Amino acid sequence: MSADLSYRYISRMSPADLAEVTAVESVAYDFPWTRGNFEDALRNGYIGLCMRDVRGELIGYCVLMPVVDEMHLLNLCVAPAAQGKGAGLALLVEAVRVTRNEKLFSVLLEVRPSNQRAVNLYERFGFDAIGRRRNYYPAAQRKREDAIVMRLTLSQEASDVAA
C-alpha cells in the first residue's frame, strides 16, 4: 500500500502548530481535543506529526505515544476538505515509519464504530480489531460510545530492512 506524498510534507508538531491543529480538530470532530490536550501531549514527549500541502496549509496530523513495547496512535485527523485524497493513508505510513524508528513493533489505536471511514482505512492498512472498550467516547445521542481497539503488528525483519 502506498501513498502519494508528492503534494504534501510532514513535520514534527510543535507548540507553534497548535492554533491550526485545534482549528482543524474543532471542525473535524464533535468532541475535539482541546489545545490543552495537545500541549500536554507534546510536553509529555508524545510524537506529534503535522501534514501540510505545498502552500503550507495544515491538512492533517496525528499524535503518537510510545508505551513500553508498542506505539499508541492517540489521534489521527484529516481536515474535512482534504479527506478522501490519501492524507490519512500518508499519515499512517509516517506513523509506522516513526514506530519502526523507535524500535517498536506494533501500533495500537481506538476508533469509534460510527466512524466507518476510519475503520475502513485502518482495516485496509492491515489493522486487526482485537477488542472493545465499552462506553469509551462521549456521544451526543447515546451519551457514550464504545471504541474498537485495533492493532497493527509490524514484522521485525521489515524494521531491520528499513533502518
Image (cartoon, helix red, strand yellow):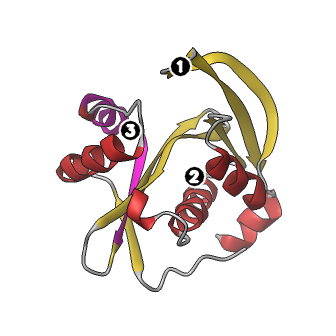
Magenta-colored span: 36-52
Could you say which quadrant of the image residue 125 lies in? bottom right
Determine the secondary structure under disc 2. Answer: loop
Q: Earlier in the sequence, mark 2 or mark 3?
A: 3
Question: As drawn, is 140 to the left or to the right of 50?
Answer: right
Q: Dividing the image into 4 quarters, which one contains the N terminus?
A: bottom right
Look at the picture and state if 144 lies above or below 30: above
**Residue to which mark 3 is pinned:** 45
Look at the picture and state if 7 lies above or below 20: below
Q: CA distance from mark 3 to mark 1?
A: 35 Å
Determine the secondary structure under disc 3. Answer: loop
**Residue to which mark 2 is pinned:** 102
* Amino acid under disc 3: Gly
Q: Which mark is residue 141?
A: 1
| Label 2 Cα neighbours within 10 Å, binned few <14 / some 14-19 / many ≥20 | some
* Amino acid under disc 1: Gln
